[in-house]
Image (cartoon, rainbow, N blue to C red):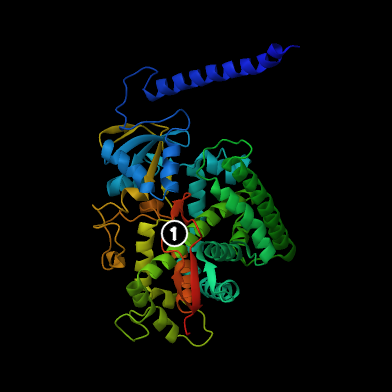
Amino acid sequence: MDAFDSFMPYLLHLVLLYVFAGLFYFLYKYKSSGGGGGPTPNLPPGKKGLPYIGETLDFVLASRRGTPEKFVTDRTTKYSPDVFRTSLLGEDMAVFCGSAGNKFLFSGQNKYVTSWWPDSIKKALMDPSSVDNSSKEESTKLRAYLPPFLKPESLQHFIPVMDIMAKEHLNQHWSPYNEVQVFPLSKKYTFALACRLFMSVTDYDEIENFAKPFALATAGLMSVPIDLPGTTFNRAVKAGRLIRQRLLALITQKKNEILEKGKTVASDLVDSMLMDGMTEVEIGNKIVGFFIASHDTTSTAITFIVSYLSDYPEVYNRVLEVMFSTNCWENAEQMEVLRCKEAGEPLRWEDIQKMKYTWCVACEVMRLAPPANGSFREAITDFTYAGYTIPKGWKAFWMVHTTHKNPKYFPDPERFDPSRFEGNGPAPYSFVPFGGGPRMCPGKEYARLEILTFIHNLLTTFKWVKLNPNEKISYIPSPIPKEGLPIKIQPLLN
């Protein structure tokens, strides 16, 4: 066989690749132009970018440069301030903008839209046997189960555990050192806490067995779902498979213990779901969802609260000291909360309720550095919004960046000002780190307790300065300090 014969199969493959690529592009353009008969709908203005990839790379690049809002503002300026058309993650997508767009999607659940998860999330983290289940069905089941677990009367029992674990974490991972990296340590704390509350896992090695693959899996959640060796998505799929295997083993073990011991009182969330008759696969999917919601987002919020408190000494001092009163029951903040406690007494529900200004600070931090970009929906019928038609099957995307740094809702939006959240606070549907309406994140109160408990312990134990005030921030998809936010710490009492 000569060289030409050897090369022919590769040449034919190359030709076929170009033929199929051309056919795919023609069908893509034909579909996007409304081809197929009937009148062309008045679609939102915008562009879809490259076939399959769409504008995903533009979105990712803007995020990695630390300016995800630029992806939005460039298009709202060019096309429409209400809704624009794009293509992300291989899907036709309408991005709804402003508080009106947020309200429409939040209140239109199951009327115009339903929940939708990108293939990258479903394939990386969900059990393959459950991927075909509708997002609407899964979301309904999840929310039907969650309320008892997340009611204040249930959550208040977690506060002493959160407090004790925060103290142990600071003593073990902060106190022995003069310098620490806040971001990886906050992730370590929030993940260990989730393991304890959701699964009663407290062993360090066992926690690490979940934490390492979980980090790889979440890194690929918003990647283009191309499952080729070496891609972020491929690593996420492999890590997700490992997580499900380990979760299934743990859930099966806990199920056997319940049966063998005749256990009737749940020790954690997994026990509760098993006693409710849920299958191991259902529980595994839900636990993964809980980890995403309770781990990445809260650790990001904690990290940037530490960062902003370092940048604004006057805010730090106000959070730390007494606010207008020395009465233990009125307007007390961190040091006053501490003074009102007996030695060794853990935080309680009533202590958290006093930390009003600290929560204003946390909200302003989440406005400027939102832990999550937003969320997706899928159109379940053709509908019209702002004069444009959104076809059935299109995906919808609401983003915090259409309001959080918009001067229409937050004057001088780049200025750090926690007082924005005092009194009546921002306009409805403009501050949406937890979503809004009937689709508001059911874990909002859990996140509030976790954040405030950790910040209380940190503020009353250490003082700190940032080692690199000009550290770059990248969104992947949550904001991440590129150096992990290194700080120099010393005991508060020194």
- Can residue 283 be seen here? no
Residue 91 visible here = yes
- Residue located at (55% from left, 76% from top): 167
Depth order, front residue of 417/332: 417
The percent coordinates of residue 141 (x first, y second) are 51, 49
Q: Position of residue 416 (x, y in %)?
A: 31, 63
In-front residue for pair 493/279: 493
> Circle 1 — which element?
loop
Residue at the image point whose x is 62% and y is 18% from the top: 13
Please identify the quadrant where the N terminus is shown.
top right
Judged left or right of residue 184, residue 248 is: right
Residue sitting at the far front: 3
Give the percent coordinates (x, y) of residue 477: 47, 49
Residue with the mark numbered 1: 471
**Rendered residue at 26%/68% (across/down):** 423
Q: Amino acid at mark 1?
A: Glu
Residue 2 occupies which quadrant of the picture?
top right
**Rendered view: 35 above or below 266:** above
Question: In the rendered image of this protein, does residue 85 appear above or below residue 174?
Answer: above
At label 1, counting other C-alpha atoms closer than 10 Å, the crowd grade (few under 14, some 14-19, many 20 or more) is: some
